Amino acid sequence: MVLTVEGTSQVRSYASQKHQKLILAAQKRNRQRKLEKPPEKDKLSWMKKSKKLLIGPRRETYEDRQKEPPVDDVFYTDKYMPTVYPAAEAIAMHRETHHPTVLDDADALLYAFVELSLKTKKKTKFREDFSGTVLYNHPFTTTKREKRIIALCKSTDVATASLAAGAEVAGGTTVVKRGFFRGVDFASKSDQQELDYGFVEVPVGRLNMETEQLTDNIKTLLTEIDGFKPKGTNPGTFITKVELRCPPTTEKFIIACSEFLDHYDDAEEGEEDEVQLKQ
């Protein structure tokens, strides 16, 4: 009891019964929370977010050009300037790794990995993703299946029934125009982090084809891709790098775009002169 001037009043040094119950309940929840395992991150939501962010190779940077060229046959690729090979030599090196005595995959698919500059005349706008079909002069099979069933029909009902019966492609005359018989579809991909960067990866043939046939297909592909160059941009600036890849190996060999497209000669020479002036 505490006496005051106005009278007598009681001061409690403990919580009321109602508040005491709330405090005990909160303490119990805290003890249970400590005993429980920490909540794991939702893997599914993380995978969905990661798919939106394209994590892949980036274009050749200015720091790469500042590196010294390799002086030996064996060297760390990240320590020296990237080597540019003739297309025929790059194909021959892929054939060595896929030889019957090594990987035993002589008819493996050869891919061209083409990096693109999506810049337009306006600095704040970039080229949107595009897709197309390339018709090679030397066709090849892109799957292990030798026979393809293609149904030409006029109505959508017949096309649906044909697909259900096992046809690989069904449609009207547009199917032929799109080159399903010997054409290869491709689509570009862009990066949400580097908006001016994009790439296309397309098969250009099989290793057991003649070297001249493969190089001719590479030229056909690069010509087709270069046709999607943003309007108003300088010629020879759309394709920034071309690599030849051949799974299952992770080896990749850079080839010069100027070997196939003449208007890329001036662009590549201008970049080299600019680097020399900065040095």
Image: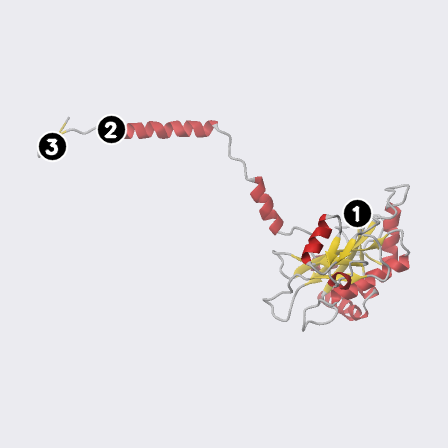
Rendering coords of residue 141 (x, y %): 83, 52
User: As displayed, is residue 85 above or below residue 106?
Assistant: below
Q: What's the image's color scheme? A: secondary structure
The N terminus: image quadrant: top left
For the residue labelled by badge 3, is the local secondary structure a helix, a strand or a loop? loop
Task: Report which residue position mark 3 lands on.
Answer: 4
Rendering coords of residue 211 (x, y %): 90, 57
Task: Report which residue position mark 2 lands on.
Answer: 16
Q: Earlier in the sequence, mark 1 or mark 3?
A: 3
Q: CA distance from mark 1 to mark 3?
A: 91 Å
Q: Choose top left, top right, bottom left or bottom right for residue 275.
A: bottom right
Task: Report which residue position mark 1 lands on.
Answer: 247
Q: Amino acid at mark 1?
A: Pro
Q: Residue furthest bottom?
A: 232
In the picture, measured across the screen, residue 86 lies left or right of residue 122, that is: right
- Do labels 2 and 3 touch, CB within 8 Å? no
For the residue labelled by badge 1, is the local secondary structure a helix, a strand or a loop? loop
Q: CA distance from mark 2 to mark 1?
A: 74 Å
Q: Residue at x 64, y 56 (%)?
A: 191
Q: Earlier in the sequence, mark 2 or mark 1?
A: 2
User: As displayed, is residue 100 above or below residue 142?
Assistant: above
- 2 or 1: mark nearer the eye: 1
For the residue labelled by badge 2, is the local secondary structure a helix, a strand or a loop? loop
Q: CA distance from mark 2 to mark 3?
A: 22 Å
Q: Amino acid at mark 2?
A: Ser
Q: Earlier in the sequence, mark 2 or mark 3?
A: 3
